[in-house]
Image (spheres, helix red, strand yellow):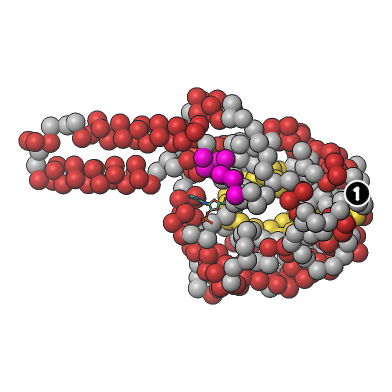
Amino acid sequence: MPAVGMGTALPIPVPHEVTKDAVLAAIELGFRHLDTAAMYGTEGPVGEAVADAVRRGLLRSREEVFVTSKLWCTTCHPELVLPSLRETLLKLQMEYVDLYLIHWPVCMKPGPITWPAKREDAVPFDFEGVWLAMEECHRLGLAKAIGVSNFTTRHLERVMSVATITPAVNQVELNPVWQQRTLRAYCAEKGIHVAAYSPLGGQNWNGSGEANAVLESEVLSEIAQARGKTVAQGYGIFIENDWANASLLGNLALVFCCITLFLHILLLFKMHQISLRWIHEQGVTWIVKSYNKGRLKQNIDIFGWELTEEDRLKISQIPQRKFVTAIALFSPEGEFTSVDLSEMDIV
Ligand code: A2P
Protein backbone atom coordinates (compact mmCIF):
# COMPACT_ATOMS: atom_id res chain seq x y z
CA MET A 1 0.00 0.00 0.00
CA PRO A 2 1.64 3.28 -1.06
CA ALA A 3 2.39 5.48 1.94
CA VAL A 4 0.53 8.48 0.58
CA GLY A 5 -2.79 8.66 -1.20
CA MET A 6 -5.22 11.03 -2.85
CA GLY A 7 -8.74 11.26 -1.45
CA THR A 8 -11.88 12.00 -3.44
CA ALA A 9 -14.42 12.72 -0.68
CA LEU A 10 -15.49 16.29 -1.21
CA PRO A 11 -18.00 18.23 0.91
CA ILE A 12 -20.09 19.10 -2.15
CA PRO A 13 -20.52 17.06 -5.34
CA VAL A 14 -18.46 18.22 -8.30
CA PRO A 15 -18.87 17.31 -11.98
CA HIS A 16 -17.51 13.95 -13.03
CA GLU A 17 -14.88 15.56 -15.30
CA VAL A 18 -13.47 17.64 -12.45
CA THR A 19 -12.70 14.55 -10.39
CA LYS A 20 -11.33 12.72 -13.42
CA ASP A 21 -8.96 15.58 -14.29
CA ALA A 22 -7.79 15.95 -10.69
CA VAL A 23 -7.08 12.22 -10.40
CA LEU A 24 -5.19 12.28 -13.70
CA ALA A 25 -3.14 15.24 -12.46
CA ALA A 26 -2.41 13.36 -9.23
CA ILE A 27 -1.24 10.30 -11.17
CA GLU A 28 0.95 12.51 -13.31
CA LEU A 29 2.48 14.03 -10.15
CA GLY A 30 3.30 10.56 -8.81
CA PHE A 31 0.32 9.58 -6.64
CA ARG A 32 -0.17 5.81 -6.89
CA HIS A 33 -2.85 5.41 -4.25
CA LEU A 34 -6.42 6.55 -4.92
CA ASP A 35 -9.17 6.52 -2.36
CA THR A 36 -12.83 6.43 -3.33
CA ALA A 37 -16.11 5.03 -1.94
CA ALA A 38 -19.61 4.15 -3.09
CA MET A 39 -20.78 7.09 -1.00
CA TYR A 40 -18.54 9.69 -2.65
CA GLY A 41 -19.92 9.07 -6.14
CA THR A 42 -16.36 9.21 -7.49
CA GLU A 43 -15.76 5.57 -8.43
CA GLY A 44 -16.66 6.25 -12.08
CA PRO A 45 -14.26 9.17 -12.62
CA VAL A 46 -11.48 7.48 -10.64
CA GLY A 47 -11.76 4.42 -12.90
CA GLU A 48 -11.85 6.59 -16.02
CA ALA A 49 -8.79 8.53 -14.91
CA VAL A 50 -6.84 5.31 -14.34
CA ALA A 51 -7.87 3.95 -17.76
CA ASP A 52 -6.90 7.27 -19.36
CA ALA A 53 -3.57 7.29 -17.54
CA VAL A 54 -2.83 3.83 -18.94
CA ARG A 55 -3.83 4.96 -22.46
CA ARG A 56 -1.58 8.02 -22.20
CA GLY A 57 1.35 5.97 -20.89
CA LEU A 58 1.37 7.64 -17.44
CA LEU A 59 0.86 4.16 -16.01
CA ARG A 60 2.01 0.91 -17.59
CA SER A 61 -1.13 -0.83 -16.37
CA ARG A 62 -3.91 -0.59 -13.79
CA GLU A 63 -1.75 -2.75 -11.47
CA GLU A 64 0.50 0.26 -10.89
CA VAL A 65 -2.12 2.03 -8.80
CA PHE A 66 -3.58 1.05 -5.46
CA VAL A 67 -7.33 1.64 -5.42
CA THR A 68 -9.42 1.64 -2.26
CA SER A 69 -13.21 1.73 -2.17
CA LYS A 70 -15.76 1.37 0.63
CA LEU A 71 -19.01 -0.36 1.45
CA TRP A 72 -21.71 2.15 2.40
CA CYS A 73 -23.91 1.82 5.51
CA THR A 74 -27.08 0.98 3.56
CA THR A 75 -25.34 -2.09 2.15
CA CYS A 76 -23.80 -3.25 5.43
CA HIS A 77 -25.99 -6.34 5.31
CA PRO A 78 -24.37 -9.75 4.70
CA GLU A 79 -26.32 -10.44 1.48
CA LEU A 80 -25.58 -6.97 0.05
CA VAL A 81 -21.80 -6.91 0.48
CA LEU A 82 -20.82 -8.87 -2.64
CA PRO A 83 -23.38 -7.16 -4.93
CA SER A 84 -22.14 -3.78 -3.68
CA LEU A 85 -18.56 -4.62 -4.46
CA ARG A 86 -19.59 -5.84 -7.91
CA GLU A 87 -21.34 -2.52 -8.51
CA THR A 88 -18.23 -0.66 -7.35
CA LEU A 89 -16.10 -2.68 -9.77
CA LEU A 90 -18.52 -1.96 -12.58
CA LYS A 91 -18.24 1.77 -11.93
CA LEU A 92 -14.45 1.58 -11.63
CA GLN A 93 -14.28 -0.62 -14.73
CA MET A 94 -11.83 -2.80 -12.85
CA GLU A 95 -11.60 -6.48 -12.05
CA TYR A 96 -10.58 -5.95 -8.47
CA VAL A 97 -9.99 -3.28 -5.86
CA ASP A 98 -6.75 -3.34 -3.92
CA LEU A 99 -8.57 -2.64 -0.70
CA TYR A 100 -12.26 -2.82 0.23
CA LEU A 101 -13.32 -1.22 3.52
CA ILE A 102 -16.48 -1.19 5.60
CA HIS A 103 -17.01 2.58 5.56
CA TRP A 104 -18.51 2.98 9.05
CA PRO A 105 -19.43 0.68 11.95
CA VAL A 106 -22.95 1.88 11.23
CA CYS A 107 -25.70 -0.08 9.49
CA MET A 108 -28.72 1.52 7.86
CA LYS A 109 -31.83 0.06 6.29
CA PRO A 110 -31.15 -1.04 2.71
CA GLY A 111 -31.91 1.69 0.21
CA PRO A 112 -30.31 4.39 -1.89
CA ILE A 113 -27.34 6.32 -0.57
CA THR A 114 -28.64 9.46 1.08
CA TRP A 115 -26.65 12.14 2.82
CA PRO A 116 -27.23 12.92 5.56
CA ALA A 117 -29.22 9.83 6.52
CA LYS A 118 -32.20 9.74 8.84
CA ARG A 119 -31.44 8.49 12.29
CA GLU A 120 -34.51 6.26 12.29
CA ASP A 121 -32.96 4.38 9.36
CA ALA A 122 -30.15 3.06 11.56
CA VAL A 123 -30.41 -0.65 12.42
CA PRO A 124 -28.15 -2.96 14.48
CA PHE A 125 -24.93 -3.96 12.75
CA ASP A 126 -24.35 -7.69 12.08
CA PHE A 127 -20.56 -7.56 12.47
CA GLU A 128 -20.13 -11.30 12.01
CA GLY A 129 -22.27 -11.66 8.86
CA VAL A 130 -20.86 -8.55 7.21
CA TRP A 131 -17.24 -9.39 7.95
CA LEU A 132 -17.63 -12.98 6.69
CA ALA A 133 -19.14 -11.56 3.47
CA MET A 134 -16.11 -9.25 3.18
CA GLU A 135 -13.88 -12.32 3.54
CA GLU A 136 -15.80 -13.96 0.69
CA CYS A 137 -15.03 -10.93 -1.52
CA HIS A 138 -11.37 -11.46 -0.79
CA ARG A 139 -11.52 -15.18 -1.51
CA LEU A 140 -13.16 -14.47 -4.86
CA GLY A 141 -10.21 -12.21 -5.74
CA LEU A 142 -12.44 -9.15 -6.07
CA ALA A 143 -10.71 -7.38 -3.19
CA LYS A 144 -6.98 -7.98 -2.77
CA ALA A 145 -7.31 -6.86 0.83
CA ILE A 146 -10.22 -6.10 3.14
CA GLY A 147 -10.49 -3.77 6.09
CA VAL A 148 -12.56 -1.25 7.97
CA SER A 149 -12.90 2.47 8.45
CA ASN A 150 -13.92 4.58 11.43
CA PHE A 151 -13.69 1.55 13.74
CA THR A 152 -12.78 2.00 17.39
CA THR A 153 -10.94 -0.70 19.35
CA ARG A 154 -14.37 -1.83 20.56
CA HIS A 155 -15.64 -2.33 17.01
CA LEU A 156 -12.40 -4.02 16.00
CA GLU A 157 -12.75 -6.46 18.91
CA ARG A 158 -16.14 -7.49 17.59
CA VAL A 159 -14.77 -8.13 14.11
CA MET A 160 -11.67 -9.91 15.40
CA SER A 161 -13.78 -12.28 17.47
CA VAL A 162 -15.32 -13.73 14.28
CA ALA A 163 -12.67 -13.03 11.66
CA THR A 164 -10.64 -15.67 9.89
CA ILE A 165 -8.91 -12.82 8.05
CA THR A 166 -7.70 -9.92 10.19
CA PRO A 167 -8.72 -6.52 8.77
CA ALA A 168 -5.69 -5.30 6.81
CA VAL A 169 -6.40 -1.63 7.41
CA ASN A 170 -8.42 0.67 9.65
CA GLN A 171 -8.86 4.05 7.96
CA VAL A 172 -9.68 6.73 10.52
CA GLU A 173 -9.57 10.46 11.12
CA LEU A 174 -5.98 11.09 12.17
CA ASN A 175 -3.79 14.18 12.30
CA PRO A 176 -1.74 16.09 14.91
CA VAL A 177 -4.98 17.37 16.49
CA TRP A 178 -6.51 13.88 16.70
CA GLN A 179 -3.57 11.52 17.08
CA GLN A 180 -5.44 8.29 17.93
CA ARG A 181 -2.67 6.98 20.20
CA THR A 182 -4.73 4.22 21.86
CA LEU A 183 -6.19 3.00 18.59
CA ARG A 184 -2.76 3.02 16.92
CA ALA A 185 -1.23 0.99 19.75
CA TYR A 186 -4.08 -1.52 19.53
CA CYS A 187 -3.78 -1.82 15.74
CA ALA A 188 0.00 -2.25 15.95
CA GLU A 189 -0.48 -5.10 18.40
CA LYS A 190 -3.05 -6.81 16.15
CA GLY A 191 -1.18 -6.25 12.87
CA ILE A 192 -3.76 -3.82 11.47
CA HIS A 193 -2.30 -1.01 9.38
CA VAL A 194 -3.65 2.45 10.12
CA ALA A 195 -4.54 4.91 7.35
CA ALA A 196 -5.37 8.54 8.02
CA TYR A 197 -8.19 10.54 6.48
CA SER A 198 -8.48 14.26 7.16
CA PRO A 199 -4.69 14.43 7.63
CA LEU A 200 -5.04 18.21 7.31
CA GLY A 201 -8.01 18.44 9.61
CA GLY A 202 -10.72 17.97 7.00
CA GLN A 203 -13.13 20.38 5.47
CA ASN A 204 -15.89 21.61 7.68
CA TRP A 205 -17.31 18.11 8.24
CA ASN A 206 -19.71 18.93 11.02
CA GLY A 207 -21.12 21.87 9.10
CA SER A 208 -20.27 24.33 11.85
CA GLY A 209 -17.93 26.35 9.63
CA GLU A 210 -15.34 26.29 12.45
CA ALA A 211 -11.70 26.96 11.66
CA ASN A 212 -9.61 24.00 10.63
CA ALA A 213 -7.74 23.05 13.81
CA VAL A 214 -4.77 21.55 11.94
CA LEU A 215 -4.17 24.33 9.46
CA GLU A 216 -4.69 26.89 12.25
CA SER A 217 -2.43 25.15 14.74
CA GLU A 218 0.11 27.52 16.29
CA VAL A 219 2.43 24.65 17.14
CA LEU A 220 2.57 23.46 13.53
CA SER A 221 2.97 27.01 12.31
CA GLU A 222 5.92 27.59 14.67
CA ILE A 223 7.60 24.38 13.53
CA ALA A 224 7.09 25.30 9.87
CA GLN A 225 8.52 28.79 10.42
CA ALA A 226 11.52 27.44 12.31
CA ARG A 227 12.21 24.99 9.46
CA GLY A 228 12.01 27.80 6.93
CA LYS A 229 14.60 29.64 9.02
CA THR A 230 16.89 26.61 9.11
CA VAL A 231 16.83 26.43 5.33
CA ALA A 232 17.48 30.17 5.10
CA GLN A 233 20.41 29.87 7.52
CA GLY A 234 21.94 27.18 5.30
CA TYR A 235 21.81 29.60 2.38
CA GLY A 236 23.08 32.41 4.61
CA ILE A 237 26.48 30.73 5.00
CA PHE A 238 26.72 30.56 1.22
CA ILE A 239 25.63 34.16 0.70
CA GLU A 240 28.12 35.48 3.27
CA ASN A 241 31.05 34.45 1.08
CA ASP A 242 33.14 37.18 -0.54
CA TRP A 243 31.12 37.43 -3.71
CA ALA A 244 32.24 41.04 -4.33
CA ASN A 245 35.51 39.73 -5.67
CA ALA A 246 34.00 36.69 -7.31
CA SER A 247 33.94 35.83 -10.99
CA LEU A 248 30.89 36.36 -13.20
CA LEU A 249 30.09 32.69 -12.72
CA GLY A 250 30.28 33.17 -8.98
CA ASN A 251 27.89 36.08 -9.06
CA LEU A 252 25.48 34.14 -11.25
CA ALA A 253 25.63 31.43 -8.61
CA LEU A 254 24.73 34.04 -5.98
CA VAL A 255 21.68 35.19 -7.96
CA PHE A 256 20.64 31.58 -8.48
CA CYS A 257 21.09 30.95 -4.76
CA CYS A 258 18.93 33.94 -3.80
CA ILE A 259 16.13 32.89 -6.15
CA THR A 260 16.23 29.32 -4.82
CA LEU A 261 16.22 30.60 -1.26
CA PHE A 262 13.17 32.72 -2.01
CA LEU A 263 11.38 29.74 -3.58
CA HIS A 264 12.34 27.50 -0.68
CA ILE A 265 10.92 29.90 1.87
CA LEU A 266 7.85 30.38 -0.25
CA LEU A 267 7.19 26.77 -1.09
CA LEU A 268 8.75 24.63 1.57
CA PHE A 269 7.72 23.70 5.05
CA LYS A 270 4.20 24.93 5.09
CA MET A 271 2.32 23.65 8.07
CA HIS A 272 0.34 21.09 6.07
CA GLN A 273 3.62 19.46 5.16
CA ILE A 274 4.55 19.33 8.84
CA SER A 275 1.27 17.56 9.55
CA LEU A 276 1.68 15.13 6.64
CA ARG A 277 5.31 14.44 7.51
CA TRP A 278 4.41 13.79 11.16
CA ILE A 279 1.73 11.28 10.12
CA HIS A 280 4.19 9.58 7.77
CA GLU A 281 6.78 9.32 10.54
CA GLN A 282 4.19 7.59 12.73
CA GLY A 283 4.05 4.77 10.16
CA VAL A 284 0.55 5.80 9.12
CA THR A 285 -0.54 6.04 5.48
CA TRP A 286 -2.30 9.34 4.74
CA ILE A 287 -4.99 10.20 2.23
CA VAL A 288 -5.24 13.89 1.54
CA LYS A 289 -7.98 15.63 -0.41
CA SER A 290 -7.27 18.39 -2.86
CA TYR A 291 -8.16 18.82 -6.51
CA ASN A 292 -5.70 21.70 -6.78
CA LYS A 293 -2.59 20.67 -8.73
CA GLY A 294 -0.23 22.97 -6.83
CA ARG A 295 -1.45 21.64 -3.50
CA LEU A 296 -1.28 18.04 -4.68
CA LYS A 297 2.34 18.66 -5.63
CA GLN A 298 3.11 20.31 -2.31
CA ASN A 299 1.44 17.51 -0.38
CA ILE A 300 3.48 14.73 -1.96
CA ASP A 301 6.68 16.61 -1.22
CA ILE A 302 7.27 15.29 2.29
CA PHE A 303 10.22 13.03 1.67
CA GLY A 304 13.94 13.63 2.12
CA TRP A 305 13.66 15.56 5.39
CA GLU A 306 12.65 14.78 8.96
CA LEU A 307 11.08 16.42 11.95
CA THR A 308 13.36 16.86 14.96
CA GLU A 309 12.81 15.24 18.37
CA GLU A 310 11.80 18.69 19.65
CA ASP A 311 9.20 19.04 16.86
CA ARG A 312 7.78 15.62 17.72
CA LEU A 313 7.61 16.50 21.40
CA LYS A 314 5.76 19.74 20.66
CA ILE A 315 3.29 17.91 18.39
CA SER A 316 2.68 15.26 21.05
CA GLN A 317 1.52 18.04 23.40
CA ILE A 318 -1.11 19.53 21.05
CA PRO A 319 -4.52 19.40 22.81
CA GLN A 320 -6.60 16.66 21.22
CA ARG A 321 -9.93 17.14 19.54
CA LYS A 322 -12.03 14.92 17.26
CA PHE A 323 -14.05 16.45 14.47
CA VAL A 324 -15.73 13.63 12.60
CA THR A 325 -18.27 11.62 14.55
CA ALA A 326 -20.85 9.11 13.39
CA ILE A 327 -23.46 11.64 14.44
CA ALA A 328 -22.35 13.68 11.43
CA LEU A 329 -23.88 10.95 9.26
CA PHE A 330 -27.40 11.73 10.34
CA SER A 331 -29.77 14.55 9.70
CA PRO A 332 -30.85 16.49 12.78
CA GLU A 333 -34.54 15.84 12.04
CA GLY A 334 -34.50 12.07 12.47
CA GLU A 335 -35.02 10.38 15.82
CA PHE A 336 -32.27 8.08 16.96
CA THR A 337 -34.58 5.28 18.01
CA SER A 338 -33.37 1.91 16.83
CA VAL A 339 -29.84 1.77 18.17
CA ASP A 340 -27.88 2.81 21.19
CA LEU A 341 -26.28 6.18 20.41
CA SER A 342 -23.05 5.30 22.24
CA GLU A 343 -22.63 2.35 19.88
CA MET A 344 -22.83 4.62 16.88
CA ASP A 345 -20.48 7.34 17.88
CA ILE A 346 -16.76 7.16 17.52
CA VAL A 347 -15.10 8.27 20.72
P1 A2P B 1 -8.70 22.37 -1.39
O1 A2P B 1 -9.66 21.23 -1.63
O2 A2P B 1 -9.28 23.72 -1.67
O3 A2P B 1 -7.37 22.13 -2.05
P2 A2P B 1 -8.15 16.73 4.45
O4 A2P B 1 -7.44 15.91 3.44
O5 A2P B 1 -7.52 16.75 5.79
O6 A2P B 1 -9.61 16.40 4.51
O7 A2P B 1 -8.04 18.26 4.03
C1 A2P B 1 -8.55 18.69 2.87
C2 A2P B 1 -8.64 20.19 2.95
O8 A2P B 1 -7.32 20.75 3.05
C3 A2P B 1 -9.26 20.72 1.70
O9 A2P B 1 -10.12 21.75 2.09
C4 A2P B 1 -8.10 21.23 0.90
O10 A2P B 1 -8.44 22.39 0.18
C5 A2P B 1 -7.09 21.60 1.94
N1 A2P B 1 -5.73 21.35 1.45
C6 A2P B 1 -5.25 20.23 0.90
N2 A2P B 1 -3.95 20.36 0.59
C7 A2P B 1 -3.62 21.65 0.95
C8 A2P B 1 -2.44 22.41 0.89
N3 A2P B 1 -1.32 21.91 0.39
N4 A2P B 1 -2.48 23.68 1.34
C9 A2P B 1 -3.59 24.20 1.87
N5 A2P B 1 -4.74 23.52 1.97
C10 A2P B 1 -4.77 22.27 1.52
Q: Going by the image, does 111 lie left or right of 259? A: right
Q: Residues within 10 Å of mark 1 (few under 14, many from 20)?
A: some
Up the image or down, 90 lies above or below 99; here it is: below
- On-image quarter of the C terminus: top right
Q: Position of residue 75 (x, y in %)?
A: 84, 62
Q: Going by the image, does 173 lie left or right of 326? A: left
Q: Position of residue 20 (x, y in %)?
A: 56, 69
User: Which residue is farthest left?
Assistant: 245
Q: Amino acid at mark 1?
A: Val
- The one nearer the camera, 53 or 278, is 278
Res. 2 visible in picture: no
Q: Quadrant of residue 191?
A: top right
Q: Is residue 183 magenta?
A: no
- The secondary structure that most of the magenta stretch takes on is loop
Q: Is residue 214 magenta?
A: yes
In the image, the segment drawn in magenta is 209-216
Up the image or down, 304 lies above or below 109; here it is: above
Q: Going by the image, does 192 lie left or right of 319? A: right
Please name the residue shown 87% across and 59% down the image.
121
Please name the residue shown 55% across and 64% down the image.
23
Please name the residue shown 16% across and 47% down the image.
252
Q: Which residue is mark 1?
A: 339
Q: Position of residue 148 (x, y in %)?
A: 77, 50
